[in-house]
């Protein structure tokens, strides 16, 4: 069975669930394809629900992990310079605040070692990564990496071989896991008594305030805010002790959790809860117009792109990130609308985007070709990209920015 529809909340197990956004049927965003395999493409409902009990915003349609993260997973974090910089400063914070030399740092969903490479000199590190080809890249950087999904059983094995961990992190992965209970039970096995579990996830407040509905895709099962996370950790006798907003991925939240101590937690926890409350994230009413707001962006983009095509203009897309595929499929774009999309990830070049079947080309093509318009799918790196592509813009190319408001620059 490659797809299940849940009927209970992932965090509190409640059943008071209301659909707040439907984006249609989509193939998994990282399953780039080719002409030969188009016929095998599977699509699944992409719908977002709100839990009236703990206020978690989540998907209830769960696509099997094998469908989403197969042997040659397409995403290498280190391909993105802004991300490399982000994880370097994240590591610096952990070194200053949590670690002493020789401590063990474990990263769940460690990708190509992007965070752990910053610790190898003075600390012991262990990455856990289900995609074999990505884990191999990490080992080349000297980051010891286990292939596989993190479980309680694996946690016990790590304690036996490496001892307890002072820091366990899970970045842009905690929100991708259906069975969060298993992860937290594993964390409790592996975490030192005075250790912290740190997660970074896309923040619901940013998603809602900036209309980032394209960050919804099948891997992203949860759209976290502080309140449901407090609820979740409390069930395991743990507590959220610190939270920070970070700009990465269009706005994320870094959450520190520890075993319950009863000691003071930082005031940031209360401050963000209050902010969420004021923004309406704890009530269904805030999401009443969510569908209409998403449809309005879609309608604007479709009429722009198809209008330009009618005038004989060439429209391409810039960047093929996961969220770009949500946007392309929600808009119903095809290669008729968008000639090609450029991306720096070697694995994607030469393939077709899932669902929309637009050819992915190397960015080198932009040295010789000047499209009239480029739809900026990697809008979260907007400033970085607009600066980087100044020469292309001087040649007359214009960028269409889709989120938070459709604009042409």
Image (cartoon, rainbow, N blue to C red):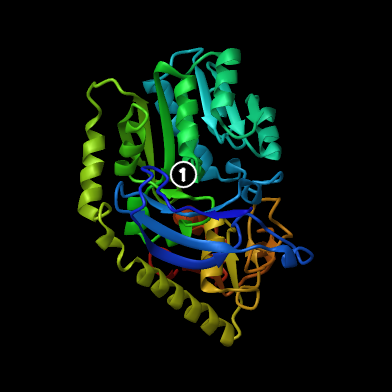
Q: Is residue 50 above or below residue 231?
A: below
Is 169 or 89 nearer to us in this picture? 169
Q: Which residue is drawn at the image coordinates 55% and 67% (left, top)?
A: 25
- Name which quarter of the figure residue 157 lies in: top right
Classify residue 153 as left or right of residue 10.
right
Question: In the picture shown, does residue 324 fall above or below 258?
Answer: below
Q: Nearer the viewer, residue 324 or 261?
A: 261
Residue matched to label 1: 175
Q: Is residue 118 visible?
A: no
Measuring from the top left, give residue 214's x and y in whole percent. 47, 61
Measured from the top left, where is residue 118 in percent x and y?
A: 53, 27
Question: In x, y percent, where is residue 5?
Answer: 51, 56
Quarter occupied by residue 337:
bottom right
Name the quadrant of the C terminus: bottom left
Q: Is residue 85 left or right of residue 134?
A: left
Rendered residue at 47%/56% (across/down): 215
Residue 212 is situated, as x and y percent measured from the top left of the image, at: 41, 59
Mark 1, other Cα within 10 Å: few <14 / some 14–19 / many ≥20: many
Q: Is residue 192 left or right of residue 391?
A: left
For residue 203, above or below residue 327:
above
In the displayed structure, would residue 244 be above or below residue 266? Answer: below
Secondary structure under the numbered disc 1 in the rendered image: helix
129 or 101, nearer to the observer: 129
Q: How many marks?
A: 1
Residue 114, visible in the rendered structure = yes
* Residue with the most extreme bottom position: 311
């Amino acid at each position: 069975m490659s797809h299940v529809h849940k009927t209970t909340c992932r965090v509190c197990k409640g059943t008071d669930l209301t659909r707040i956004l439907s984006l249609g049927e989509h193939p998994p965003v990282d399953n780039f394809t080719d002409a030969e395999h188009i016929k095998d493409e599977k699509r699944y409902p992409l719908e977002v629900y709100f839990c009236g009990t703990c206020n978690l915003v989540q998907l209830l349609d769960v696509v099997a992990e094998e469908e989403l993260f197969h042997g040659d997973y397409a995403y290498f974090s280190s391909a993105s310079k802004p991300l490399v910089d982000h994880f370097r400063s994240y590591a610096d914070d952990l070194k200053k605040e949590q670690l002493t030399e020789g401590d063990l740092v474990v990263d769940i969903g460690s990708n190509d070692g992007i965070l752990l490479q910053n610790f190898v000199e003075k600390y012991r590190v262990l990455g856990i990564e289900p995609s074999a080809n990505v884990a191999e890249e990490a080992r080349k950087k000297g980051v010891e990496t286990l292939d596989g999904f993190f479980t309680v059983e694996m946690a016990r094995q790590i304690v036996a071989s490496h001892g307890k961990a002072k820091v366990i992190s899970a970045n842009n992965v905690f929100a991708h896991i259906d069975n969060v209970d298993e992860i937290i039970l594993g964390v409790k096995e592996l975490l030192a008594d005075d250790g912290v579990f740190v997660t970074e996830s896309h923040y619901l407040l940013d998603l809602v305030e900036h209309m980032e509905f394209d960050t919804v895709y099948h891997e992203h099962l949860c759209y976290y805010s502080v309140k449901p996370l407090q609820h979740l950790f409390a069930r395991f006798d743990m507590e959220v002790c610190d939270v920070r907003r970070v700009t990465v991925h269009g706005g994320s939240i870094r959450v520190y959790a520890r075993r319950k101590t009863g000691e003071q937690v930082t005031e940031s926890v209360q401050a963000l809860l209050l902010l969420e409350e004021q923004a309406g994230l704890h009530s269904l009413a805030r999401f009443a117009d969510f569908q209409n707001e998403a449809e309005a962006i879609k309608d604007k983009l479709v009429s722009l792109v198809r209008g330009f095509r009618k005038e004989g203009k060439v429209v391409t897309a810039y960047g093929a990130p996961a969220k770009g595929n949500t946007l392309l499929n929600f808009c119903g774009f095809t290669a008729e609308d968008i000639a090609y999309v450029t991306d720096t990830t070697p694995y994607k070049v030469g393939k077709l985007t899932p669902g929309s079947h637009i050819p992915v080309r190397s960015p080198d093509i932009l040295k010789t070709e000047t499209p009239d318009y480029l739809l900026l799918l990697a809008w979260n790196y907007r400033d970085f990209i607009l600066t980087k592509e100044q020469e292309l813009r001087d040649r007359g190319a214009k960028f269409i920015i889709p989120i938070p408001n459709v604009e042409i620059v």
